[in-house]
Image: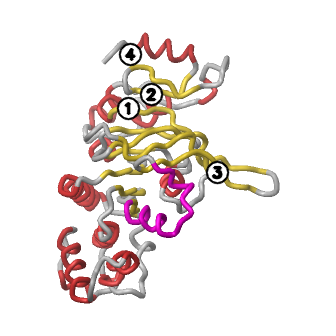
């Protein structure tokens, strides 16, 4: 992983209207960077805004406020169709539901080649077919699968098709939005290992969105934890697991089961209560120690620095 920024998120907000006067602050002032070649894990429970963050980054939603800088260019300020097309080629998404994300009326070859057709990346039908076959083999499938329909595949195979479709336009950045949550546990590791293999081979950068902290740690270089639209903690994966600071992060980690009966009998859940925070000032996202950021007040930061003195 390099320290060259690929993506910069500055004060990103995504608010939705609710009723006549209500507003849902799905994403409320996020700030983080993603470096070239890394996997940035984004975790939190359902409804915290992590999937909305991914969809806003890739412009499936227009941002309410803030910036999404991709290679220094603001994605949400681009209006020119040609420039938008270029961004769409560089940034791709793997969706959560492998059943709903593939058109049931299209053959696999046409599903995967959709991006090739849009961006004019194949000069003729023969080249188009060769690229599709190569992509199928890349994700562990074969040429025979090209003429089948999505309903003929298992969940794991469909997610491989989704990955092949994302790879078709040769992107540099992929948002994987809970790509394994709809799969059997036995298949999840296969898909994650495939993503890691492809990253090593193609130099890809990932935003990996999930609620399963154990799997996120396995694939991620750094992890950001979201709670009700805000980032509450961000650190290297190992540091976050070994030295969680924010109470919400501690509560998530305490819920992870381990295949150890003795540990499970004595495991204590940490219950997070937002009202336990210092109420003397508005919390800010602060670098409590090098590369470890926490949403906290000045008083809470001082306590964290006392409890976790240095790396």
Residue located 48% across and 65% down the image: 84
In three-dimensional space, the C-alpha distance between marks 4 and 2, rounded to whole angstroms, equals: 13 Å
Q: Earlier in the sequence, mark 1 or mark 2?
A: 1
Residue 308 has which mark? 4
Q: Is residue 182 visible?
A: no
- Tag 1 secondary structure: strand
Residue located 39% across and 86% down the image: 106
The residue stretch that appears in magenta: 73-90
In three-dimensional space, the C-alpha distance between marks 4 and 1, rounded to whole angstroms, equals: 13 Å
In three-dimensional space, the C-alpha distance between marks 2 and 3, rounded to whole angstroms, equals: 24 Å
Q: Which residue is mark 2?
A: 293
Q: Which residue is mark 3?
A: 64
> Do the CB atoms of the residues marked 4 and 2 lie less than 8 Å apart?
no
Residue 63 has which mark? none
Farthest right residue? Answer: 20
- Tag 3 secondary structure: loop
Residue 235 has which mark? 1
In three-dimensional space, the C-alpha distance between marks 3 and 1, rounded to whole angstroms, equals: 27 Å
**Of tags 4 and 2, which is closer to the observer?**
2
Residue located 82% across and 56% down the image: 20
Image position, residue 180 (x, y; %): 35, 59
User: Residue 87: within the magenta?
Assistant: yes
Would residue 161 be found to the left or right of residue 48 on screen? left
Image position, residue 69 (x, y; %): 47, 47
**Of tags 2 and 3, which is closer to the observer?**
3
Image position, residue 187 (x, y; %): 26, 62
């Amino acid at each position: 992983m390099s320290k060259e920024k690929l993506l910069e998120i500055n004060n990103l907000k995504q608010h939705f209207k609710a009723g006549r006067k209500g507003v849902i602050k799905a994403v409320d002032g996020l700030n983080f960077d993603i470096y070239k070649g890394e996997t940035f894990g984004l975790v939190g429970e359902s409804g915290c805004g992590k999937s909305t963050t991914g969809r806003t980054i890739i412009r499936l939603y227009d941002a309410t406020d803030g910036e999404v800088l991709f290679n220094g260019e603001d994605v949400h300020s681009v209006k020119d169709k040609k420039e938008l097309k270029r961004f769409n080629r560089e940034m791709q998404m793997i969706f959560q539901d492998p059943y709903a994300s593939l058109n049931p009326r299209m053959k696999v070859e046409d599903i995967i080649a959709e991006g090739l057709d849009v961006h004019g990346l194949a000069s003729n039908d023969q080249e188009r077919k060769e690229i599709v076959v190569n992509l199928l083999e890349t994700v562990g499938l074969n040429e025979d699968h090209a003429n089948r329909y999505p309903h003929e595949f298992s969940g794991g195979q469909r997610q491989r098709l989704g990955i092949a479709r994302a790879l078709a336009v040769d992107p540099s950045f992929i948002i994987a939005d809970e790509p394994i949550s709809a799969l059997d546990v036995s298949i999840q590791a296969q898909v994650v290992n495939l993503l890691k293999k492809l990253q090593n081979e193609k130099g890809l950068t990932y935003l990996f969105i999930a609620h399963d902290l154990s799997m996120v740690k396995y694939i991620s270089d750094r992890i950001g934890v979201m709670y009700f639209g805000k980032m509450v903690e961000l650190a290297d994966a190992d540091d976050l697991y070994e030295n969680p600071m924010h109470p919400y992060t501690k509560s998530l980690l305490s819920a992870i089961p381990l295949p150890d009966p003795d540990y499970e009998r004595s495991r204590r859940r940490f219950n997070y209560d937002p009202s336990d925070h210092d109420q003397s000032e508005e919390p800010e996202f602060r670098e409590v120690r090098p590369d470890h950021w926490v949403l906290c007040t000045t008083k809470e930061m001082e306590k964290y620095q006392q409890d976790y003195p240095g790396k």
